Image (tube, grey):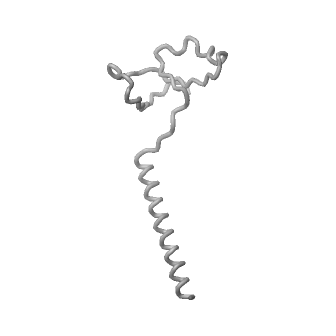
Amino acid sequence: MLLPTEKKLTVASAGWSPGTKGRITGEVVVMTARNKEDLEKYRGKLRNAIVLSQPPSTIPSVSQLAERSGQTRRNRAEGCREERRRQEGGRQEG
């Protein structure tokens, strides 16, 4: 990559956290420091940055969630049909 890429970052804060006075922008830095030595590589690079303690989670889009939900319903329906077939088959044998 030769140029920075701009992406939206949606963040939810705890209910007791104070709000901000408007929109916040800045470079996003995922800090992976686990000890004092690791922290040294970030010296001078965090001013005005949005610091994450871990990589952001991947959140599925609404359309992906809807697709999964539809697949789950179809799978459940097929499972019910198979169970019904087994039960009906058992009755005929008995």
Q: Residue furthest front?
A: 16
What is the number of callouts on the image?
A: 0
Q: Residue furthest left?
A: 21
Which residue is drawn at the image coordinates 62% and 22% (left, top)? Answer: 33
Q: Please say if 84 is above or below 68.
A: below
Which residue is drawn at the image coordinates 44% and 55% (left, top)? Answer: 69
Name the image quarter holding the N terminus: top right
Which residue is drawn at the image coordinates 48% and 64% (left, top)? Answer: 76
Q: Quadrant of residue 55?
A: top right
x, y percentage for residue 50?
47, 22
Name the image quarter holding the C terminus: bottom right
Q: Please say if 86 is above or below 79.
A: below
Question: Is 4 or 55 nearer to us in this picture?
Answer: 55
x, y percentage for residue 12?
41, 32
Q: Residue furthest top?
A: 44
x, y percentage for residue 85?
51, 78
x, y percentage for residue 13?
41, 29
Q: Is residue 47 left or right of residue 21?
A: right
Which residue is drawn at the image coordinates 55% and 83% (left, top)? Answer: 90
Q: Is residue 15 left or right of residue 60?
A: left
Question: Is 72 or 34 nearer to us in this picture?
Answer: 34
Q: Please say if 89 is above or below 3.
A: below
